[in-house]
Image (cartoon, grey):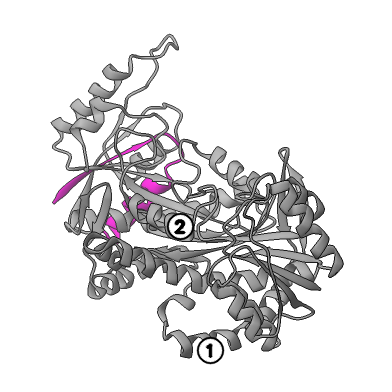
Amino acid sequence: MRICFLASRRGTNLASAIKHIELGILKGCEVTLLVTNRPGCGAEKVAEESGIEVLRMPHLGLTVAEYEEKLVKELDARGIDLVVLAGWDWMIGRRMREVYRWRLMAIHPSLHPSFIKPLSLAEEVHREVLRSGVKVTGCTVYYVDRNVDTGPIILQRPVPVLESDYRLYRSDPEAAVRRLSERVLLHEHLLLPKAIQLHADGLVRIVELYGRSIALVDADEEWEKKWNERQRKYIEVVRTRVGEREVLAVWP
Amino acid sequence: MKKLAVLASGEGTIFQSIVDHIKLGILVGVEPAVLVCNRPEAGVLKRAERAGVHAVLIPHKRPDGSRRDREEFEAEIVGILKSMGVDLVFLAGWDKVLGPTFVNEFKLRAMNVHPSLLPAFAGLYGLEVHKNVLSRGCKVSGTTVHYIDYGIDTGPIILQAAIRVRSDDTPESLSERVRMVERLVVPMAIQLHVDGRLEVKDNVVRTYLSGHWLDMWRERQSRYLSQWGLEDEDLFLSL
């Protein structure tokens, strides 16, 4: 399966996917292309370091339709099977949604349907979360559907908002936003590769329920067990890298 | 000893859990002073009788079937709670929205439990919540205990617990598992309040919680868990 990432920011989700492939956790997949609308962003460096082709496509002066016409052509030429939006800060129009229907995946730093703010940066989502006083937030991987912010949910993972986050929020709101953002990111890095593997294994089924498309995951316990065993390797690597222990063990 | 009133309209599984936690000496420093119910056919009335908790039926409809004036209905409830010296009110599957007449009187002294992770699926009740969770295709749901305010399901959040939604879940099976979680987190929220460990500022609940408090609570609650054979492997609790 040939995967293309669309990214505008640091590219940490891209890095995690690459790591999962390197470690033999994410199987049958390769990231063959990164498209970025922000030349010079962190994602670009991540891709370059791993020898992944980078396509710089600033959207300045182009309409969404023109931009996507060009984009679809480029993706077609490279035989891309799956497009992943991770930290992509621009619109996704009708053309992309139609051509890559149920092959266009995105990750969002909240538990859908909570805290969906159209085209907002992760920091804005977490700021909203801290303002609301919730005790659980999380992340969601979904297929982009009618607009870029919603669609059938493939996987979700809860993440705690801690009392210490709120304590920090009262003295330094932006530091609290960064802290929560980093924690949720760690979970995103686990969730997105799993969703990609499910997709690659043909285990995500789109069904109509009450007049709406939803994604059902058909992975059995055996699959889950094997995946968790493989992903443990990644968790070990990440742990030594970021030194964050508490948050990775909480969700079975 | 703080006096607790429970308002319920249905089966009363949460009421039962509160009563059991008190009887088992898990939830301490609080007694169930009164159960208020608005539906004569509700199962919770029988549970109150069995548990020896004073129950009051205050129907929201007149004998001829017409709806009562909301303020008058709420004033009657408030009157009873005040006359009994109630300190804390818990809405455990209570199906009537309570307005200013009630909220003014019990601001930050009345809690509600909502069977979803708020702010998702606010404003829905009972199985409707779980139907919507499933039709939205959510993979995680849960429950929220919060203080009530003037909005619907908008008050400051005390506790939330998340559970996995399974691909073969029905609204009924999901409701069943969420309720199981509620039986654990509702008494905990009450205990935190009774122990004076909750403080509200800017609509956010501040929880003064030590590791020691949590260990003690877990140890006490294990008695309830063993009695019911509940497993918490699916449970994700955040404070």
The answer to the question of whether label 2 and label 1 lie on touching residues, with beta carbons closer than 8 A, is no
| Residue type (three-letter) at the residue carrying disc 1 | Glu
Does dot 1 land on a helix, a strand or a loop? helix
Q: Position of residue A154 (x, y in %)?
A: 67, 59
Give the residues in magenta. B1-27
Q: Residue furthest top?
A: B64
Residue B181 disc label: 2
Q: Position of residue A217 (x, y in %)?
A: 72, 61
The residue located at (77%, 48%) in the rendering is A95
Q: Position of residue A140 (x, y in %)?
A: 58, 60
The residue located at (45%, 52%) in the rendering is B143
Q: Quadrant of the N terminus of chain A?
A: bottom right
Q: According to the image, label 1 marks what residue? A: A236
Task: Determine whether A193 is above or below A103 in the image.
Answer: below
Residue B168 disc label: none
Q: In front here: B34 or A5?
A: A5
